């Protein structure tokens, strides 16, 4: 019986340490701002977070993504599952220059939306016929994705400095 209790305590300690390490290592995405949407008595409020990011292979394009973030104790610990609601807007902010070969459906942003099973993605397509970059955000789970999505397009044009 003592061996079982000792083994159980070690297993629980390892799980807690892994959870703390995971929470500590979550990357920050350059949060532009946050809006509280639902008051929580314990832990942070539910909110909408707006993050900015740059396309790693396309200079001169900036994107902002807004997404729902679940608060409360589970949200604070990083184990809550956030909803699939997200919106994206991308704009030309300078001369557009391709840094590498563009592949359709290439990932430009990823973020976990739950501890294990759900992720938020932004992928890029290049509509060569119309000379437009198209960015799509969506979320998926291991077994089933969500049809909720958002799209933004950026025409590839010359840039006149303001």
Image: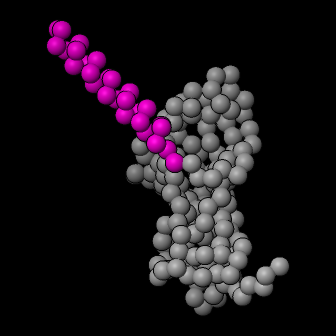
Up the image or down, 23 lies above or below 64; here it is: above
Across and down, in percent, residue 129 comes to 60, 91
Quarter of the rendering containing residue 13: top left
The chief SS type of the magenta part is helix
- Relative vertical location of residue 100 with respect to residue 120 in this rendering, above or below: below
In the rendered image, residue 95 lying in the magenta stretch gets the answer no
Segment colored magenta = 1-27
Residue at coordinates 57% horizontally, 32% vertically from top-left? Answer: 76
Residue 160 visible in the displayed image: yes
Above or below, 126 against 1 in this view is below
Residue at the spot 55% in from the left edge and 82% down from the top edge:
98
Residue farthest toward the front in the current orientation of the protein = 161
- Quadrant housing the N terminus: top left
Q: Is residue 87 left or right of residue 7?
A: right
Q: Position of residue 105 (x, y in %)?
A: 49, 72
Looking at the figure, which quarter contains the C terminus?
bottom right
Q: Residue furthest bottom?
A: 129
């Amino acid at each position: 019986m003592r061996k079982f209790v000792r083994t159980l305590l070690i297993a629980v300690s390892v799980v807690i340490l892994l959870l703390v390490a995971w929470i500590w290592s979550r990357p920050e995405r350059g949060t532009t701002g946050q809006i509280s949407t639902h008051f929580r008595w314990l832990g942070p409020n539910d909110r909408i977070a707006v993050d900015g990011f740059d396309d790693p292979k396309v200079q001169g394009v900036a994107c902002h993504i807004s997404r729902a973030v679940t608060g409360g104790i589970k949200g604070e610990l990083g184990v809550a599952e956030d909803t699939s609601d997200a919106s994206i807007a991308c704009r030309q902010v300078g001369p557009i220059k391709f840094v590498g070969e563009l592949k359709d459906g290439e990932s430009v942003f990823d973020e976990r939306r739950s501890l294990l099973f759900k992720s938020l993605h932004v992928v890029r397509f290049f509509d060569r016929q119309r000379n437009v970059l198209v960015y799509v955000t969506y979320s998926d789970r291991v077994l089933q994705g969500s049809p909720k999505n958002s799209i933004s397009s950026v025409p590839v044009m010359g840039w006149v400095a303001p």
